Amino acid sequence: MKMLSLVSAALTGLTLICSNPALGASCVTTECHSGISAFKYPHAPVKDGDCTPCHLQRAKEHPVKGAKSFALAAKGAALCKDCHEPMANLKVVHPPVKEGDCTACHKPHGANGRYLLEVADGDQGPLCLGCHDPAPFKQKFMHGPAAVGNCTECHNPHQSAEKALLKGSVRNVCLKCHADFAGILQAAAYVHPPVKEGPCTACHNPHGSPVSMFLKTKLPELCLDCHKPMAKKLAGVKVPHKPVQQEGGCSNCHSAHFSKAKGLLAADEMSVCLGCHGTSNLGTPPLRNIKKDLEGKKFLHGPIKQGSCKACHDPHGSPYFRMLRGGYPREMYASYKEGEYDGCLICHEKNLLRFPETTLYTKFRNGNRNLHWVHVAKTRKGRTCRICHQPHASDGEKLINKEGASFGDWKIPLNFKITATGGGCLPGCHRAFAYDRDKPVVYEK
Amino acid sequence: MKVSGKSLKVNVVQSLLLVALLVTLLSGCAGKTAGPGGPVFFPPAPDEPHVQYLMGINDSTDIEGKPTGFSLLLTGSEQGGVIKKIGKAYGVLAQNGKLYICSIGGAQIITIDFAKKTFDFLKGNVRGPGSLKKPTNIALDKEGNLYVADPGRGDIAVYAPDGSYLKSLGRGVNPEAAKTTIVSVALYDDLLYALDSRGNQILVLNRLTGELVRTMGSDPDGKNSVALPSNLIMDPEGFLFVTNVGKANVMKFDRDGNFLYQFGKSSDRSGGFARPKGIAIDNDGWIYVVDAAFSNVQIFGKDAKSLLGVFGSPGLPAGSLNLPAGVAVSTDNLDYFQKLAAPDFILKKIVYVVNQSVSVINPTVSVYGIGEMKGSKSGGGSK
């Protein structure tokens, strides 16, 4: 009887031992399942030594050679749902989550990375790229989070209401980090519409790209993809503006995101232009230093006075000499023909050079004799505007070329004077002549 | 003769009925303010309207109101009751808030002041040197003097702002021309530009002295010459436009006489002409050209680079033109005419067109409003 009591007490003790969580301690002994307890970040039940939430004993004997005496308590996500919230109820669900394949990413017993992820130093790249195309992540120019494999900085690995499992709208996800940008954007006078309304991914590849600033394609093609009329125009220009063709393309003059200046220029129009055209070493041979031409001058050409270069020059290129907006002869001598002086006559009196006699279109006349016509429309060696006038600035009234037009090594002086009813000149071109609108001067033949 | 009480009563009733009938008949001659089926728009629905026919003017009742039965009994009174008719008209001018109509049928100039609701004949047009015969067109100088081209008289009759006759200009100034017929006039400072339809040229006169300064509009090879010109107008920038029946076009000249360009050709397509007559230019540079053959007005944009619209074409119960001649455009009196416009149609300019063939549906002067519907996205294309 005493013996029976002892056996009964022993069985009760065994039953208690077997049904106790402390049983786990016996699962991860040095002889059995020893590796399970060796993780830096063990699964909570493992840490607690409790295997039974996931594993159920199906056979009395364990271990059994060639057979399994334990089975998982449930399959797939059903196994995890008793402890973890369900994760497949938003619009976009990561396919492994949708399929209930939690272990596609997570190690069930433990891992060397947080969240039971087998990642080293927080670099999720190898884990994610096990499934995802690695090409965008091996580009010359990489977005910071993508470069260091911090995928979950932007993406929710389980589910999201946004496309691509983003943690919010594209714009908000970007501005969450680029907070300084968001601040300036709010205060900007001019904002590029895609920046104002659209996703940043309209222009940028958020992972990486062979193009600087991880743009989707190089400039100007990226811009021209939306700016179709400009694409058409650029295809037809005969005199291109070099910055448009150089690396940086449009961004050489325009700010891609926002600006204080109209046209999203990087600064006011004149400053942008003189940023390049204000030096004496631009191009070979060097282009004129316009800044120097303007400095200290008494008279500025009307558009320049208003800070505009594009009134005369098309900054995107044009079919005309010097990227002008209308025709103007390249040569020093060119007789007037309709259309050939439109570069000037778009603004200036369009009938200026049409009629030998006029009382209307110019004050540069002797009586009614149109002296502009005499100079420019003459059939042999018509004088172009530049011989007498400076296009940008001058110390002479009417932008008269006080220093004289360049004629090889010589500067042809004009010695032009204005009177109340006319004027006169003693240029290097001909003898001294005077003119008078009211009392026409009679010239010796 | 003894008249019974009953007989007297019948006579009074008969008289009143007669007066009422007379009033009814005469009121039937007054201008109509809209078509029988509601507002008449050009272009018609479903297109967005830009022009609305507003009213017709045939006589003084359209401006001063219908005479009362009592005033009609006072025939000949200066205080109203006399219905002044326009008669067959040709030219029209809208300036200084007034409308000047050249009546060739009535040998008269009618001045309409919409603000004051007056309809007056020219004071100096009385027997004697100031008598008009066939006034075709009119111009005003900056002092308000009237210059009336009158081919019947063969000159330009000048009247003071109060309508009194001042002088004759242009008669015999051009001995080189076998015959001169001045049909239209325009002014710029002291120069008077007179269109000589028979001489195919423009005479430039000093308006103060009457002296011929020069001629223009005629070149030796005829390429840039006017041909059977009918009307002349000076635009707000001081350029001259001439309608040519002979070339079925419009030619632009500067004041020096230089030919600048032409537009239109003999064609029944949009922008073409058959018999271009009156011409007007507004402050936006829009050019309104009447075609007597097509009975319409075509509106061209500044410098005729585009055709903006057409109105007045035949076939409508109201708002169609019939043998139109002169045209004038103005931004004056918009408030006056806005009351006649459709509720949401906002007027910006008023256009007056003379019909030479007058009928029940074609008044002597058809009045149109250029505008746009409230909230229109097109903006009406006008400033």
Image: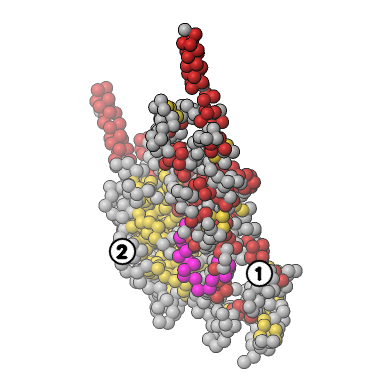
Q: Which residue is mark 2?
A: B269
Secondary structure at numbered mark 1: helix
Q: Which residue is mark 1?
A: A277
Amino acid under label 2? Arg
- B178 relative to A156 in the view: left or right: left
- B2 relative to B239 in the view: left or right: left
* Residue beneath the point at 59% across and 38% down: A40
- A438 relative to B293 in the view: left or right: right
Secondary structure at numbered mark 2: loop
Amino acid under label 1? His
Q: Is residue A227 magenta?
A: yes
**Magenta stretch, residue numbers:** A226-244
* Residue beneath the point at 46% across and 52% down: A133
Residue A106 picture location, percent across and down: 49, 39
Between residue B17 and residue B33, name the one nearer to us: B33
**Placement of B88 over or under A358, stated as above or below:** above
- On the question of residue A190 being in view, the answer is no
